[in-house]
Amino acid sequence: MVANTLLFTSVNLSGLFVRILTERAQRKAFLQARNCIEERLRMEDENEKQ
C-alpha cells in the first residue's frame, strides 16, 4: 500500500515536471514567433512609408 502510494506520487510529480518544461518550451517558441511576425509587420510598414 505504501509502495503504491510512493509510486503514484513519484509518477505524478514526474508528469508535472515534464508538463511544466513542455509548457515553457511551447511558450518560448510562441513568443519568438510572435516577435518575429511583429518585427516583420513593423518593417513592412516602414518600407511602405518610404
Image (cartoon, helix red, strand yellow):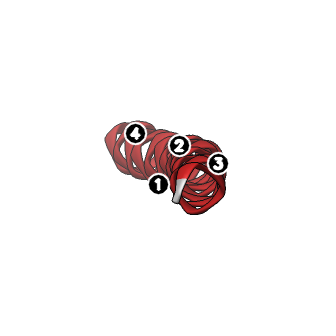
Lower sequence index among marks 1 and 2: 2
Q: Is residue 26 above or below residue 35?
A: below
Lower sequence index among marks 4 and 3: 3
Which label sits in the foreground, 1 or 2? 2
- The residue wearing badge 4 is 42
CA gap, disc 4 and disc 3: 48 Å
Judge by depth and name the residue closer to the eye, 46 or 10: 10
Q: Is residue 50 visible?
A: no
Which label sits in the foreground, 3 or 2? 3
Determine the secondary structure under disc 2: helix
CA gap, disc 4 and disc 1: 9 Å
Q: Which amino acid type is shown beneath numbered disc 4? A: Arg
- The residue wearing badge 1 is 37
What residue sits 51% from the left and 48% below the top?
A: 16
Where residue 20 appears, x then y in whole percent? Answer: 53, 43
Judge by depth and name the residue closer to the eye, 49 or 15: 15
CA gap, disc 1 and disc 3: 41 Å
Mark 4 crowdedness (10 Å alpha carbons): few <14, some 14-19, many ≥20: few
Residue 13 vs residue 48: left or right?
right
- The residue wearing badge 3 is 10
